[in-house]
Image: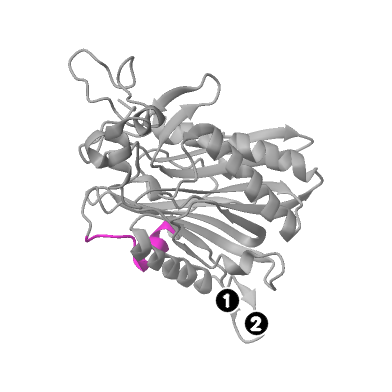
Amino acid sequence: MNGTITDVPGIEVGQAQDGAALTGCTVILCRKGAVAGVDVRGSAPGTRETDLLDPINLVQKVHAVLLAGGSAFGLDAASGVMHYLDEHKIGFDTGVAKVPIVPAAILFDLGIGNKNIRPDAEMGYQACVAASTAAPAEGNVGAGTGASVGKLFGNALAMKSGLGSASINIGNGVIVGAIMAVNAFGDVIDPANGKIVAGLRSGRVGPVRVGGEGFFADTLAMMKKPLGRGALGLVTRTNTVIGAVATNAKLAKVEAAKVAQMAHDGLAHAIRPAHTMLDGDAIFALSTGNKKADVTSIGAFAAEAVSQAILQAVRSAASAGGLPGLKT
């Protein structure tokens, strides 16, 4: 166990990024295919191939999931993932050709770094080349390279966030893992104590340390005030938390959709507010194995893994693009 989503057999993670432009992508490879579901809760999503994950539709398995920065431009990186899988003859067998099934979701990071450089097909391909079962890097990498949180007042008082992963062994050989790129409008909360870990800054300087007492303004508290209410009307839809959960438990397609739905509870536990009109929150669920487990248990621990991955994303993020991060 390495404590990340790659603890789940059949899951590989690869990442590629442009550290100067502050954008990148993360691919979750399932070379043998994975039964998949998705749940999109945010009201400003950017996605690809999510309709086919509806349980009533034909295709049962996916071969990769892509998470990328670059806003809608970043969906182009999925073409590179398809190219890689096509080269390796991995895909849905149509009888004529094997067509790789690659759902994707993007986050908006154009406001930090270089807005003219976005994840493209080449970056998606290179992320696949880098894929392995090793523990993926966290923080300012892959889809989390340009991520930030606490953006009620834009980047002026925001904080750097990133990508994080976690896994839980729930017994009987069943593992549940999560990987999340955290680019939230709101604040990241530690569910264990309800305290803000990263988010909207108060603007205080001097002896106030990053994350210390008085460092945070608290997005919900500010939304009650005239200044915060006024800012809400100016905030653009430039936020999103995207990710995937995976398990080696055997799930039907409809069960995977339920697990994706329950996984969002972890997002709501760790981010305040969550699923807003300004976020495009989306979580995929993947089943790679044949272990027997109750769907309710898988969904409950998927939510726990998501919360842990979100905390990892901000705790692993270093300062960049003028935004302070928790990692020193």
Q: Which residue is pictured at 60% across the width and 58% down the height? A: 30
Task: Answer above or below: position of 309 versus 256.
Answer: above
For this orientation, the residue located farthest to the bottom is: 96
Q: State the quadrant of the C terminus.
A: top left
Residue linked to disc 2: 94
Which three-letter amino acid code belongs to the residue tagged 1?
Answer: Val
> Image quarter for residue 56?
bottom right
- Number of numbered discs overlaid on the protein picture: 2
In screen coordinates, is 210 left or right of 187? left
Q: CA distance from mark 1 to mark 2?
A: 7 Å
- Residue interval drawn in magenta: 116-127
- Can residue 159 be seen at all in this image of the molecule? no
Residue 125: assigned label: none
In screen coordinates, is 18 left or right of 94? left
- Looking at marks 1 and 2 on the same chain, the residue that comes earlier in the sequence is marked by 2
Q: Which residue is pictured at 79% across the width and 36% down the height? A: 172
Which three-letter amino acid code belongs to the residue tagged 2?
Answer: Thr
Coordinates of residue 115 in the picture (x, y in percent): 23, 57
Dot 2 alpha-carbon crowd within 10 angstroms: few under 14, some 14 to 19, many 20 or more = few
Coordinates of residue 318 in the picture (x, y in percent): 31, 33
| Tag 1 and tag 2, C-beta contact below 8 Å | yes
For this orientation, the residue located farthest to the front is: 226
The kind of secondary structure element at disc 2 is loop
